[in-house]
Image (cartoon, rainbow, N blue to C red):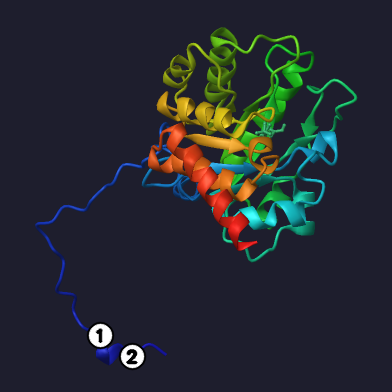
Amino acid sequence: MADKDDLKEGKNFHTHVPQTNKPFFLKGAGSLDWGMQNRLSQIFNPITGRTVMLAFDHGYFQGPTTGIERIDISIAPLIPYADVLMCTRGALRTVIPSDTKKPIVLRCSGGQSILKELSNETIAVDIEDTLRLNASAMAAQVYIGAEYEHKSISNIVKLIDTGLRYGIPTLAVTGVGAEMDRDLRYFSLATRMCAEIGAHYIKSYYFEPGFEKVVAACPVPIVIAGGKKLSEIDALEMAYKAIDQGAAGVDMGRNIFQSDHPIAMIQAVNAVVHKNEGFKQAFQLYEEIRARSATIN
Ligand code: 5RP
C-alpha cells in the first residue's frame, strides 16, 4: 500500500529551464510517432545517421545461394559486426539465436521463384508474426516498370498501412526488372515513388552518374544493395561512393558473405559507412584483418 504519510512536495522544477525538444536525427522521420522513431534508431546509428545491414534473405526466391547454403555457419560469425540483420522469418526462427540484440528487418514479400516472373510477389508475412518476432521493420520489393508493378505497389501500401498502425517502419526495396536501365531516370522514379507512397526508407542500387540526385530528390534515407559479387576493393569503392553521395548506409549481402573473408569485409564496409573511411584505407583494413586471422589460424 502506498505510504501517504511519506509524500514529499517536489522542489526541483527548474522553472527557468525550457524542456528540450530534440529533433529526430533521421531524414524525413521527424513527424513519426515514438515507436517508429525508436525502431528506426535501432536500425540507423543516431550518431552517424547510417547503417550496415547484413542481407541474407536471398533464399526466399532463389534457394541456397552461394555463401549462405548454411546460414547457421556463414552468417552467425558476422552478426556481431552488423548493425541490422535482414532475413526471412524462416531463417530467423530456425538459425538466428533469439538472444541476439541486433534489430531485424523482416523480409515480408514472397510468392515467386527465380524460375518465374520476379515481380509477381505477394505479402508473405502477417503483421502479427512481425510483432511476434520483434522485428524493427518490414521489407518488400517494389517493381516499378515490371509486369506486376501494380501488385508490388499494393503490397508495399498494405505493409505501410499496417506498419503505421503498430509503429513498424517499412523498407521499400527497388526491384529492377531485367529490361530496365539502372540509371538516374529509373532510380529517381522508383525511389521517389516509394517515398511518396509512404515507405520509411528505401533500398536502391548504386549507379553513376547521378546517384547524388536520386538521394537529394528522395525525402527519406536511401541504403544501397551490394548486388552481384565484385572484387573486395570494387565493392568498397561502390560503398564509399554511395556514402559520399548521400546514402545512409548499405544493405549488403553477396559482397559480404561471398567475400574471401566475410568477417574482414563487413568490418571494412563498417569503416566506410560509419567512419567515413576512404575505400583504399578500408581495403587495407580488410587485408590486415584477413592477414591477422590467417596468422591466428
Ligand atoms: C533480395 C534482396 C537482397 O536483400 C538484396 O539484393 C541485398 O543483397 P545483395 O547485396 O546480395 O544484392 O533484396 O531480393
Cα–Cα span, label 1 and label 2 = 7 Å
Q: Residue furthest right?
A: 115
Ligand 1 neighbours mark 1 (CB distance < 8 Å): no
Q: Secondary structure at mark 1?
A: loop
Number of other residues with Cα within 10 Å of mark 1, as a class: few under 14, some 14 to 19, many 20 or more: few
**Residue 6 or 254: which is nearer the viewer?**
254
Number of other residues with Cα within 10 Å of mark 2, as a class: few under 14, some 14 to 19, many 20 or more: few
Task: Say what amino acid the circle numbered 2 marks.
Answer: Asp
- Asked if the residues shown at circle 1 and circle 2 are in contact, with their CB atoms under 8 angstroms apart, the answer is yes
Q: Residue at x 53, y 49 (%)?
A: 83
Residue under label 1, please give it: 7
Q: The N terminus is located in which quarter?
A: bottom left
Q: Residue at x 63, y 53 (%)?
A: 78
Q: Secondary structure at mark 2?
A: loop
Q: Residue at x 82, y 23 (%)?
A: 120
- The x, y position of residue 153, in whole percent, is 68, 23
For residue 3, the mark is 2
In this picture, is 135 found above or below 120? below
Q: Quadrant of residue 187?
A: top right
In this picture, is 99 found above or below 124? below
Q: Is residue 224 visible?
A: no
Task: Say what amino acid the circle numbered 1 marks.
Answer: Leu
Quadrant of the picture in which ligand 1 is shown: top right
**Residue 232 or 15: which is nearer the viewer?**
232
- The x, y position of residue 118, in whole percent, is 81, 23
